[in-house]
Amino acid sequence: MTKTTSENIDATESETTTESALTTARRQLKRAATHVDVDDGVVERLKHPTKVQRVSVPLKRDNGELEVLTGFRAQHDDVRGPYKGGLRYHPEVTADECIGLSMWMTWKCAVMDIPFGGGKGGIAVDPKELSDEEKERLTRRFAEELRDVVGPKQDVPAPDMGTDPQTMAWFMDAYSMQHGETTPGVVTGKPSVIGGSYGREEAPGRSVAIITREAIDYYGWNLDETTVAVQGYGSVGANAARSLDKWGADVVAVSDVNGAILDSEGLDTKSVMGHDERPGMVSGYDAPQRLSNEELLELDVDVLIPAAVGNALTADNADDVQADLIVEGANGPTTFAADSIFEQRDIPVLPDILANAGGVTVSYFEWLQDINRRQWTLDRVNNELESEMLKAWDAVRDEVEAHDVSWRDAAYMVALSRVATAKEERGLWP
Ligand code: GLU
């Protein structure tokens, strides 16, 4: 096993274990640009967002007190179509985090070849400390503050950490009331009765499972003999685990914020309730063994799926990871430094911008359904998702094979050349 230090990763940039999403995203872009024949000016432009909206969001708490929270919407690039990406409610939301995450959305939409650019936003708030009524008032006011910069043809938000279909319903209603017409296409990830798509909630986890299945096949392993550990059992982690379990893999360990459970025979992933379904149920589950979240990351399994938060895999723990394959369920779970360690240790990392892209892909299907005012069946959604994921997988795998690069570099090469070509064709105005 090769021990890696900061000196042999990038001598010009010091390694930190808590690098921001923006730092990671910029380092990844810089590295990917060396593999693609793209104009330096275009790369320079893509290091920066087009616009970052910072808004104050006043909230009347249930006890009558007024609190002023800060919200953001970062719009990275829209050369291929409207900005697209989630809104997160989390205490650590910052402008830089939103910018980094919006860059990843640009690449994610381009890898999938869907006609959107990248956006991301959120409010620095702990949603667990808000009542439903407070969350509703906050969301409606946030929608009002962002009204001029969002819209079905401009920028289309969606759920992310701490937000859900109900949040999108409030956002859509607030926007529609001010516009004087019902505008379902202003957000995706809505409840299906008001223009949401069937299968949208399960889609990011489903795509993680599809990419895991394809990677297992690519390396000549057998899904029936594969062991999987999933960090984070929210919507992404639980849906990925359940699909892989259904297709024959042994999901031996899963975790939530309070800890992890392990059953070397394979857990019954359906009976373990997700963090969104019943908070606290994972660590409260009657399993043969309990572990800490950190121990789960270091289990000797075939596949590790970090599906909880950003920066889960860092220079501090990357050397201790024993999995043979990592598939990113969360956005940005691997720091740039950890990525280099995995590369030196020959542990393939299937990147977020491909693996969890099922979410934004079904968001695109939802947007089409909203524009056409015609709902698709769940079967149609899942079939089209499967074929879009396989198309993207093929494009990325072709780059891996042609240029002997990492999966992340390959995904960036596909994305960056699509975005750069679009920029070159459109040219600079004025
Ligand atoms: N928040 C999700 C993501 O990070 C979905 C974005 C969307 O559907 O627009 O991919």
Image: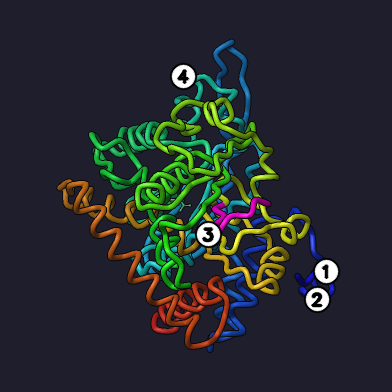
Residue type at numbered disc 4: Glu
Main secondary structure of the magenta stretch: loop
Inter-mark Cα distance, 3 to 2: 24 Å
Residue 91 image point, x, y percent: 65, 36
Inter-mark Cα distance, 1 to 2: 6 Å
Identify the residue under disc 4. 133
Is 207 drawn above or below residue 242 in the view shown? Answer: below
- What residue is at 80 percent from the left and 76 percent from the top? 8
- What residue is at 79 percent from the left and 59 percent from the top? 16
Q: Which of 344 and 102 is in front in this view?
A: 344
Q: Do the residues labelled 4 and 1 touch (CB within 8 Å)?
A: no
- Would you say residue 303 sits in the magenta stretch? yes
Horizontally, residue 339 falls left or right of residue 112, namely: right
- The segment highlighted magenta reads 298-305
Indicate the secondary structure of the residue bearing disc 2: helix
Indicate the secondary structure of the residue bearing disc 3: strand
- What residue is at 61 percent from the left and 33 percent from the top? 125
Residue type at numbered disc 3: Val
Residue 200 image point, x, y percent: 33, 46
Q: Do the residues labelled 3 and 1 touch (CB within 8 Å)?
A: no
Pick whichever of labels 4 and 1 is earlier in the sequence.
Answer: 1
Residue 327 tag number? 3
Pick whichever of labels 4 and 2 is earlier in the sequence.
Answer: 2
Horizontally, residue 242 falls left or right of residue 371, namely: right
Q: Do the residues labelled 1 and 2 touch (CB within 8 Å)?
A: yes
Pick whichever of labels 3 and 2 is earlier in the sequence.
Answer: 2
Identify the residue under disc 2. 8
